[in-house]
Amino acid sequence: MLTLLMVQLQSFSRLSLVFVTGPLGLIGATGALLLSNRPFGFVALLGLIALAGMIMRNTVILVDQIDRDIAAGHARYRAIIDATVRRARPVALTALAAILGMIPLAGSLFWGPMAITIMGGLFVATGLTILVVPALYAIWFRVRIDEAQMPKAADVRNLDRFGRRAVPFQVAAE
């Protein structure tokens, strides 16, 4: 898994950032197992390993979008915000699909602890991923609001609601 992520991310610092977010699901998994009064056995441990993979996948999606926005010429601070806003819905919907897919297994005596671990952990970790990963990225790569990237007072009226430069409609001269 480490090798595949290194090939995909092409950076040790991005790889470290992704691995730091792996344990975000422990909070929800522990709470869900306690609320459902299920044991933390081998099957729940398998669910925890699968959960870490799902969380890291969501982080890779978010970090990759931030890097693409920066490569497209956006300011780093703005790229973090825009990428998070754009990727929040797909990340949340895929997590919701996985959570809903585990409902039939939750009642099972054998697979129930794994399903509950994944459901609770993914529910909490998705919210934490959307909130924590952008902040971690900004801290990790020392992103600040640069004065050179901030618009001048005269240019503010040419910005759209996301702070990007709006291109005015121009009619071609004939």
Image: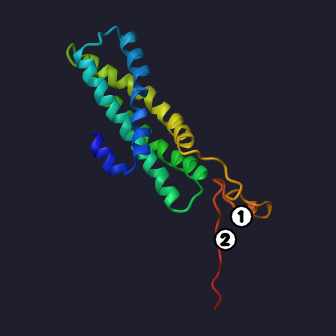
Residue 151 visible at all = yes
- The residue lying at 57 percent from left, 52 percent from top is 76
- In the rendered view, would you say 56 is above or below 32? below
**Residue 110 position by quadrant:** top left
What is the tally of numbered marks visible in this picture? 2
Q: Which residue is mark 2?
A: 168
Q: Which residue is mark 1?
A: 158
- The residue lying at 40 percent from left, 49 percent from top is 11
Front-lying residue, 95 or 30: 30
Residue 103 visible at all = no
The image shows residue 109 at horizontal and vertical percentages of 21, 13
- In the rendered view, would you say 17 is above or below 153? above
The image shows residue 37 at horizontal and vertical percentages of 34, 8
Q: CA distance from mark 2 to mark 1?
A: 8 Å
- The residue lying at 28 percent from left, 16 percent from top is 113
Front-lying residue, 68 or 104: 68
The reply to whether discs 2 and 1 touch (Cβ–Cβ < 8 Å) is: yes
The image shows residue 44 at horizontal and vertical percentages of 27, 18
**Residue 111 position by quadrant:** top left
Outermost left residue = 110
Helix or strand or loop: what does disc 1 sit on? helix
Outermost right residue = 153
Quarter placement of the C terminus: bottom right
User: As shown in the figure, which amino acid type bears the numbered disc 2?
Assistant: Pro
Helix or strand or loop: what does disc 2 sit on? loop
Asked whether, in this view, residue 104 is left or right of residue 147, the answer is left
The image shows residue 144 at horizontal and vertical percentages of 64, 47
- The residue lying at 69 percent from left, 60 percent from top is 159
